[in-house]
Amino acid sequence: MAYPRVASLKTHDDFVSHLRDSDIEMPSDAEVESGDASPLAQSFEVHGQTVGNRWSILPMEGWDGTTDGLPTDLTRRRWRNFGLSGAKLIWGGEAVAVRHDGRANPNQLLLTDKNLSAIESLRQELVDEHESHFGRSDDLLVGLQLTHSGRFSRPNIKSLTEPRTVQRNVVLDRRVKITDDSAIFTDDELSTLIDDFIEAAVRAEKAGYRFVDVKHCHGYLGHELLAGRERTGKFGGSFENRTRFLRDIVSGIEAATNDLKIGVRLSLFDFLPFHPGADRVGEPEPGGEPNKVFGGGEDGLTIDMTETSKLVDLMHEIGIRMICTTAGSPYTNPHIQRPAYFPPSDGYTPPEDPLAGVARQIAAVAEMKKKHSEMIFIGSGYTYLQDYLPNVAQAVVKAGMADSIGLGRMVLSYPDLPADVTAGTVWQRKKVCRTFSDCTTAPRNGIISGCYPLDPFYKKRDERKQLNDLKKALQA
C-alpha cells in the first residue's frame, strides 16, 4: 500500500483534496492567523493559572542522562529548546522515573533526593531561556512527568529487558521474555510504588514544578493497570480497583504537598499489538487479547471510549483538570500512537495512510472534549501533518476540539515552530520533521536520541555515522 508523502502535497488545496479523496475527516484552515488575535495565541485558565497560548511541549523519552539519572549537556540543550519554543505549557519535558527499576533505559532521568537540584536546574534553564526570548514567564506553566515503565523497563543495560508488570499478556510477555508470574507486582509492592510516586511529587514541588503528570499511557505501568480486568486483588478486576493506583497517588500527593497540581497523560484508546506481516506491513500479532486493551472495542481493533469517559469523570471528581491525550503504545502499535511514513528499525510499514492515524486521535480528543467541557485537553499526534500542522491546529482550537496542541518529535527538529507560527514568521520548511523515525531507531539500538537528519547539531555528531551504518546493516 502506497500513500503520498505529506511533503509531496505542495499546497493546502492539495492537502485538503487528498483528505477528501481518502475519506479522512480533519479540519484545516486555508490561512493561518498570526499575532495577538490568532486562535493559537489565545490564553486559557487552569487551576487559577493563565497559560499564555495554545501550544504545549509533550513529554518524550530521554536517552541522554547519566546512569545515575542526572541530566547531561544534551538534556539541558533540549530543555532550553523547549523554553525558546514559545509554547506556554510544558508537559513534563520528558519522562522522569520515580525509582530505578522503573527506568525505560539506563540513561533516563531519575527523581531522587540526590538528583533534585539538577532536576530543578533543568526547569530553571528552560524558564530563563523562555524569558530571554519572550520577556515574561508568569504565563508559562511547567510540570514534570512521573513514570514507572512497567513491562518496558530496562534500568541497567540498554539491550536487557527487566519487566515488572501487573498481569500476564500472551503477546507482550513473549516480547519482553516473561515466562512466569515472577515479574508481576504484588498488591503490597504496588502500595510501595504509590508511596514512591508521592515522594517524587514532593520532590518535584520542591524543585519548583507547578504540576506533576501521573503517567497512564503507552503500555507503561499506570496504563496497563487500567486494563487489568483479569488481575485479582485490590488493583484489578473492577473499574474501581483498576483506578485505585491513580486515586491513591492523587490523594497522597494532595496530603503531602502544598499547592502542587496533578495532570495525567492518558492513552484515550488502544489497539491490540501489531507486528510486521506480509511485506512488513503492520498487522495484529496472533494471540492478542482484546480484554486487556483499554479504550478498545471487543475486537481490540476499534475504539470504545466508554470506560475512558468514565475515567475522565473520576479524574474531575478527584481534582484533576488537565489531560494530555495520546493513544496506544510506541512499542506495540505505533501507527495509531505517532503516525509516520517511515517506520523505526523495529517497526512496520503503516497499514493505513498515517493521516488517518492523526485524524483518529483528533476525533477522539474532540469527542472527549465535547463530553467533558470542564476539562483541559492537550492534543497529540500532530507531527505527521508537517507543513499543514499550523492549519489543522488552528482549526481544531477554533472549533473547541482541544484546548492546546501538543508537539513532540516536531520540536526536536523545529523547536521554535510555536514562536514562528504565532509571530507570523516565514515558515522554516527545512526544519519540519518528516517522521524519518531516526529519533526512535537510534535509542532502540543503544544510540542517544536526537534529530539526526535535520538538526545541524546532531548532524555533526559521531553518532550520526554510527546510526547510518546501523541502518545500512539492517537493510542489507
Image (spheres, rainbow, N blue to C red):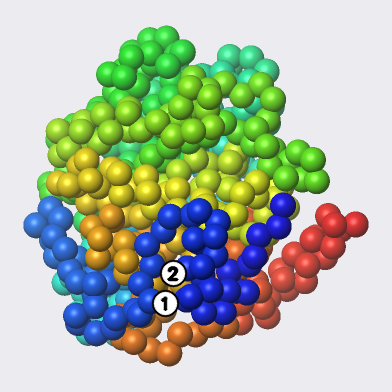
- Residue in the image at 37% along x and 45% along y: 364
Vertical arrangement, residue 371 with respect to residue 221, above or below: below
Tell me if residue 25 can be seen: yes
| Left or right: 464, with 397 as reference point | right
| Left or right: 159, with 304 as reference point | right
Q: Marks 1 and 2: which is nearer the front?
A: 2
Q: Position of residue 475 (x, y in %)?
A: 85, 57
Q: Answer with the quarter of the image where residue 305 lies.
A: top left
Could you give the CA–CA distance between mark 1 and mark 2, rounded to whole angstroms?
A: 10 Å
Q: In front here: 11 or 191?
A: 11
Vertical arrangement, residue 288 with respect to residue 349, above or below: above
Q: Position of residue 383 (x, y in %)?
A: 49, 64
- Residue in the image at 38% along x and 76% along y: 30
- Residue in the image at 19% along x and 65% along y: 51
Q: Residue furthest right?
A: 476
What residue type is disc 2 on? Leu
Q: Residue furthest left?
A: 48
- Residue in the image at 79% along x and 61% along y: 471
| Residue, disc 2 | 389
Q: In front here: 418 or 235?
A: 418
Query: What's the mark number on residue 417?
Result: 1
- Mark 2 and mark 1 in contact (Cβ < 8 Å)? yes
Secondary structure beneath label 1: helix
What residue type is disc 1 on? Leu
Q: Position of residue 137 (x, y in %)?
A: 21, 74
Tell me if residue 158 can be seen: no
Secondary structure beneath label 2: helix
Q: Residue furthest front?
A: 21
Q: In front here: 125 or 414?
A: 414
Tell me which label, 1 or 2, sits earlier in the chain. Answer: 2
Q: Position of residue 467 (x, y in %)?
A: 75, 64
